[in-house]
């Protein structure tokens, strides 16, 4: 079943968390001259209109990027992220929200590459249209991202960031992301892996972070797990209360950056009194 369209949720609190980390991780990779690849397993459409189409139906961006857009007191990591959104809206009006591929491409250098997978036929078509002029630096496949990771890892430069962020519309995704991370670490042990997941009341969602921490491939590696909760988890298991990012092989400075950043995000994006964040580190 492939009915999920990210445009309904573009720019919401989950995108804020995911893209703050994405920008920081790419900033880290840029510190060395050697080339790197960014691989996105579930790329979506690439960029989204916030004042027309699907995004207007739920308008989730209002409580996400919309709350940060007018602020002038942003901590550095949030400022880095918001500045990237501003570049997509040069007239100062918040009309477009860049998806993960757009954030990544804007930060790549000439020697770096972007590899995108999207299985949804309509999203894949929009993605191709969005990046039609990008040449060899961007390669798009209308294909299953999990299988795509197996084919690409390790990337030729042996440096890379792998973003795994399915919709979890299908229950099987909970097991598939665990398998994808484990297999990825087997093939490319030194890569940085950023895995997004929702905070829901469902059993599979609650169990996922612990299963990721227990992967045998992480027994000799490092990991970081950060969550942002904006409201109370619904008793029926439906409705996303927040989201998390599990990062394998995180840069050493990422945890400190998040300690300085997450209180601000939790306070700025809170929708009820239960809002907050967690931050855990593990491994060597």
Image: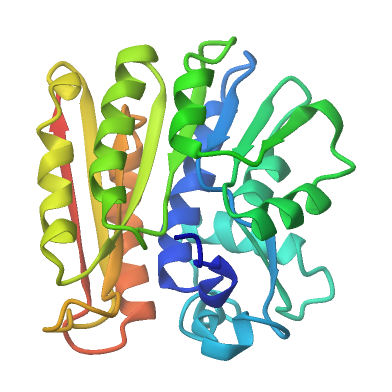
Q: How is colour applied across the structure in the image?
A: rainbow
Question: Residue at image x 36%, y 30%?
Answer: 251
Name which quarter of the figure residue 7 lies in. Answer: bottom right
- The quadrant of the image that shows the C terminus is top left
Residue 20, given in percent of the width and then of the height, sits at: 47, 55
| In front of the other: 157 or 273 | 157
Q: Is residue 191 visible?
A: yes
Question: Residue at image x 59%, y 64%?
Answer: 82
Residue 169, given in percent of the width and then of the height, sits at: 37, 63
The reply, left or right, for residue 85 in relation to residue 281 is: right
Q: Is residue 284 visible?
A: no
Tell me if residue 116 comes above or below residue 283 in the rendering. Answer: below
The reply, left or right, for residue 35 in relation to residue 216 is: right
Residue 228, given in percent of the width and then of the height, sits at: 28, 65
Tell me if residue 136 comes above or below residue 45 in the rendering. Answer: above
- The quadrant of the image that shows the N terminus is bottom left
């Amino acid at each position: 079943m492939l009915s999920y369209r990210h445009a309904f949720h573009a720019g919401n609190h989950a995108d804020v968390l995911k893209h703050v980390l994405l920008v920081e991780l790419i900033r880290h990779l840029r510190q060395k001259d050697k080339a790197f690849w960014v691989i996105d397993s579930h790329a979506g459409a690439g960029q989204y209109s916030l004042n027309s189409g699907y995004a207007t139906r739920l308008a989730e961006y209002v409580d996400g990027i919309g709350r940060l857009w007018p602020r002038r007191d942003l901590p550095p990591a949030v400022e880095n992220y918001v500045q990237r959104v501003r570049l997509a809206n040069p007239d100062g009006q918040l009309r477009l929200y860049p998806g993960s591929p757009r954030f990544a491409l804007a930060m790549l250098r000439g020697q770096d590459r972007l590899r995108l997978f999207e299985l949804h036929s309509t999203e894949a078509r929009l993605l191709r249209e969005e990046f039609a002029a990008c040449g060899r630096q961007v390669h798009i496949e209308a294909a299953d991202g999990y299988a795509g990771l197996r084919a690409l890892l390790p990337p030729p430069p042996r440096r890379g960031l792998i973003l795994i962020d399915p919709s979890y519309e299908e229950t099987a995704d909970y097991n598939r992301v665990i398998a994808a991370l484990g297999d990825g670490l087997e093939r490319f042990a030194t890569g940085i892996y950023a895995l997004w997941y929702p905070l829901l009341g469902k059993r599979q969602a609650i169990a996922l972070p612990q299963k990721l921490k227990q992967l045998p491939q992480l027994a000799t590696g490092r990991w970081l797990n950060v969550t942002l909760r904006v409201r109370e988890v619904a008793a029926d298991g439906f409705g996303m209360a927040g989201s998390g990012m599990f990062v394998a092989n995180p840069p050493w400075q990422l945890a400190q950056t998040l300690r300085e950043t997450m209180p601000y995000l939790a306070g700025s994006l809170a929708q009820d009194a239960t809002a907050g964040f967690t931050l855990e580190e593990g491994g060597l």
